[in-house]
């Protein structure tokens, strides 16, 4: 892992709306550019789930 090329993204609510969809496209770009990518999000199923090459950290967050 090259720590000079590390980026962390945070999106608390992973779902199938527009902002997680756009963020996934940005994340996939950085993965292709060989960045170490960490994503902090919740465990719900959405566009941010199961992205190859991403290190996940989960937080408990729910819409209220």
Image (cartoon, rainbow, N blue to C red):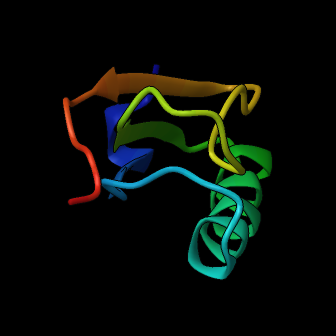
Above or below residue 17? Residue 48 is above
User: Can you give x and y, in whole percent of width and height, for residue 14 in the image?
Assistant: 51, 50
The quarter of the displayed image where residue 42 is located: top left
Q: Residue at x 63, y 56 (%)?
A: 27
**x then y, percent, for residue 35:** 56, 44
Nearest the viewer among 60 and 6 is 60
Residue with the most extreme front position: 64
Q: Indicate whether 17 appears above or below 1.
A: below
The image quarter containing residue 18 is bottom right
Residue drawn at the location 43% of the way across and 24% of the way down: 56
Of residues 62 and 1, the one nearer the viewer is 62
Quadrant where the image shows the C terminus: bottom left
Position of residue 55 in the picture relative to residue 53 (left or right): left
Q: Residue at x 21, y 31 (%)?
A: 59
**What x and y, as percent, mark residue 60?**
19, 30
Give residue 61's quadrant in the image: top left
Q: Nearer the viewer, residue 32 or 13?
A: 13
**Left or right side of 62 for 29:** right
Q: Residue shown at 66%/33% (left/top)?
A: 49
- Number of labels in the image equals 0
């Amino acid at each position: 892992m090259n720590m000079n090329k590390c980026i962390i993204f945070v999106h608390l609510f992973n779902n199938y709306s527009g902002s997680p969809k756009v963020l996934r496209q940005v994340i996939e770009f950085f993965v292709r550019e060989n960045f170490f990518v960490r994503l902090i999000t919740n465990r719900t199923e959405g566009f941010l789930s199961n992205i190859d090459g991403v290190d996940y950290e989960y937080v408990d967050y729910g819409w209220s």
